[in-house]
Image (cartoon, helix red, strand yellow):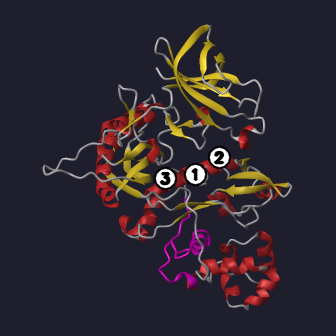
Amino acid sequence: MNGRPDAPPIAAIAKIKNAMRLVAVDACGHMAGLRTEQTLSDARALFPDLDVFDHDAQADAALLAAVAAWCDRYTPLVALERLPESVSGSCAGLFLDISGCAHLFGGEEAMLADVTARLRVGGLMAQAAIADTPGAAWAFARYGEKPVIAPGEHGKDLLDLPLAGLRLEGEMLDMLRKLGLRTVGCIAGLPRAPLAARFGNGLLLRLDQALGRVEEAISPRLPVPELSSERIFAEPIALQEDIERTAAQLAGNLRQRLDERQLGARQLELKLFRVDGHVVTIAVRAASPVYHADRIVTLFRERIAGFHEDLDAGFGFDLIRLNIVESEPRQVEQADLGGNTGKNHGEAFSSLVDRLGARLGTDRVQRFVAADTHIPERSYSLVAPATGRAAAADQAVFWREDGAVEDGGGPQVLTRPVVLFDRPEQVEAVAEVPDGPPIRFHWRKTLYKITRSEGPERIACEWWRDGRGGHSRDYFRVEDEEGHRFWIFRQGLFERETRNPKWFMHGLFA
């Protein structure tokens, strides 16, 4: 907090250790002697007119998450830091792994200056530093004077910093101070065994992490995209047409890399960085691997149209990035002598599914997939086309006029009805023999006389799901006098499972 020059210091307070204490103090308060963890009564003794407000941890977390999203413009490796309350002077911050990114902004010093300047324009005062290790960067950002530490120099410069720069707990710091140990250099040269015996391994671990003896990994808040392309604008853009044109260019940049790896994108996100620091993320999923720029743009166009309101561009976007979050192997199209490639017969259908999913939501457009069961009404389920990977069994099936199906391997006999009921409906049927097909049945207040029948096809029960009371089924394909075909079954084997089997209607062929 910057404070207000024409007003008394301002501080945030919270109940800590059964007392109201200062959690954050503005610059004027620090200059006047106020500090965090100080009791409110002691602070009031120094400044009776101290202006205080209740600390809102959730608002701080939301602000930190927003800043982290904005920092994605510099590197995809942004980690949230949440130290325990017992750590002295703890204040949640961010770790940015800028390995291989600094040269894009003119070097480390120019990059750090750009970050702090942009945050200052947004009303935030940031303490930042660049060092070889996360622990050293944390210490120099809070207690050091040099914002950028040269490679290999952090170990020497770290020795002059206070022990609080090692992210130690308050009780441990108090014990070290009572022994006269106040800087990192005071413990760096001491024997390690007595330190571990007196203060535990945590002290040595923090020291080794800061010095680089032990590697400290940071956990990015978001997974790193598989492929990414971005464009920076000297003048911000705000029109939807410009955004779509830029997305097409970025998708075109990724096309060659996708072809080289024989991949197609299944999940993509378009990140729009506003000049005021706000980040708009538009995420889409595709029903099948996509790689054409026009199809990718169509996904985002439908997604934006699904907002039912204009995209809030504010004062414009100065950076747009297209990320491929999830990809899937695909077959690369082979061009003919004229350089043309033929489209797959299912591409138009997949494009329609993608458009509907982007406009209505991927969970509202569903497809049938096979389930691991032989019970007909349980043999399928509904899932969103954009979830999971396409299975070989989910290929397109084409129906023929003669009642057979064709799946690319030649015609096959249709053994399952066109219409399958979710729940079988009980019917009254009469058979010549107990194990034979029905000769007539009564269903939905109508009597049907059977002229032809095929079967039985026996399907056993799933004893692990239905229990011992489950009965087997004998299915028959039957046809009545008018040519209507039905799928009917008898539940229970006569005199082996039951003495009174029941008949059920389960589907219609025509």
Q: Is residue 136 magenta?
A: yes
- Which amino acid lies under the numbered mark 1 shown in the image of this protein? Ala
Badge 1 vs badge 3, beta-carbon distance below 8 Å: no
Crowding at mark 3 (Cα within 10 Å: few <14, some 14-19, many 20+):
many
User: Of helix, strand and loop, which one carries label 1?
Assistant: helix
Mark number, residue 70: 3
Magenta residues (range): 126-155
Taking depth in this image into account, of 144 and 115 the one nearest to the observer is 115
Badge 2 vs badge 1, beta-carbon distance below 8 Å: no
Marks 3 and 2, the one that precedes in the sequence: 2
Mark number, residue 65: 1
> Separation of disc 3 and disc 2 at Cα?
17 Å
Is 381 placed left or right of 283 in the picture?
right
User: Of helix, strand and loop, which one carries label 3?
Assistant: helix
Taking depth in this image into account, of 388 and 482 the one nearest to the observer is 482
Is 417 placed left or right of 432 in the picture?
left
Work out which quarter of the rendered image holds the N terminus and state it: bottom right
Q: Position of residue 67 (x, y in %)?
A: 53, 53
Badge 3 vs badge 2, beta-carbon distance below 8 Å: no
- Which amino acid lies under the numbered mark 2 shown in the image of this protein? Ala
Marks 2 and 1, the one that precedes in the sequence: 2
Is 88 placed left or right of 102 in the picture?
right
Q: Is residue 208 visible?
A: yes
